Amino acid sequence: MIFIAAIVLGLVFGVLTGGRIENLARLRFRWPVLVLVALIVRAAILITPLNAVDGAQFVYLLGLVVIVAWTIWHWRRLRGVWVVSVGGALNVIVIAANGARMPVAHESAGSLNSRGTYGQYTLMGPNTNLTFLGDWIRLSPVPGAYSIGDVIIALGLAIVVFLAVRNPRPHRDKELTPP
């Protein structure tokens, strides 16, 4: 939900400051199918019974690693995407440090409180590593809890969309243009 809101905000502010929605169609990505497959795999693990399969959390983590690698690969092509990479990397770090599961604070855990672990999520406890990078941030009125990485990803998505709506040219075009 937070990511969709960030994309919409970037779009709205881009248009309000003179950008054009059509500029989004001018964006060119390398291997867009790779990130699309990673997003679909992550969503399938998140919202289907696959999340109850032991080991699926490692596939979820791998999907996140692929997305972070893809964003890093696009740093010179897609302005502002480095912010998304930073947020994704923070999520990779905390998930990897906790057995491929994202730790969630008790007050934000809902039904996870009675289960302890579910899919790629685990309840924060005394043995949780890097709790400050886990899901504990509440953003009312948006439901759920988010990590610092999630907030940075959302900020990055808003920046990427804003900049793309304002000017869709990649960084490389600016660097290769003679003075």
Image: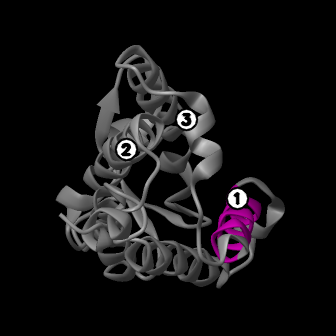
Q: Secondary structure at mark 1?
A: helix
Magenta segment includes 35: yes
Q: Amino acid at mark 1?
A: Ala
For marks 1 and 3 on the same chain, the one whose residue lies earlier in the sequence: 3
Q: Residue at left 52%, top 78%? A: 61
Q: Which mark is residue 4?
A: 3
Camera-near label (3 vs 2) is: 3
Q: Residue at left 50%, top 38%? A: 110
In the rendered image, which quarter is residue 120 located in? Answer: bottom right
In the displayed structure, would residue 109 be above or below residue 72?
above
Q: Residue at left 31%, top 81%? A: 97
In the rendered image, which quarter is residue 139 located in? Answer: top left
Spatial distance from mark 1 to mark 2, Cα to Cα? 16 Å
Q: Which mark is residue 146?
A: 2
Q: Residues within 10 Å of mark 1 (few under 14, many from 20)?
A: some
Quadrant where the N terminus lies?
top right
Magenta segment includes 163: no
Residue 58: percent from left, percent from top: 57, 83
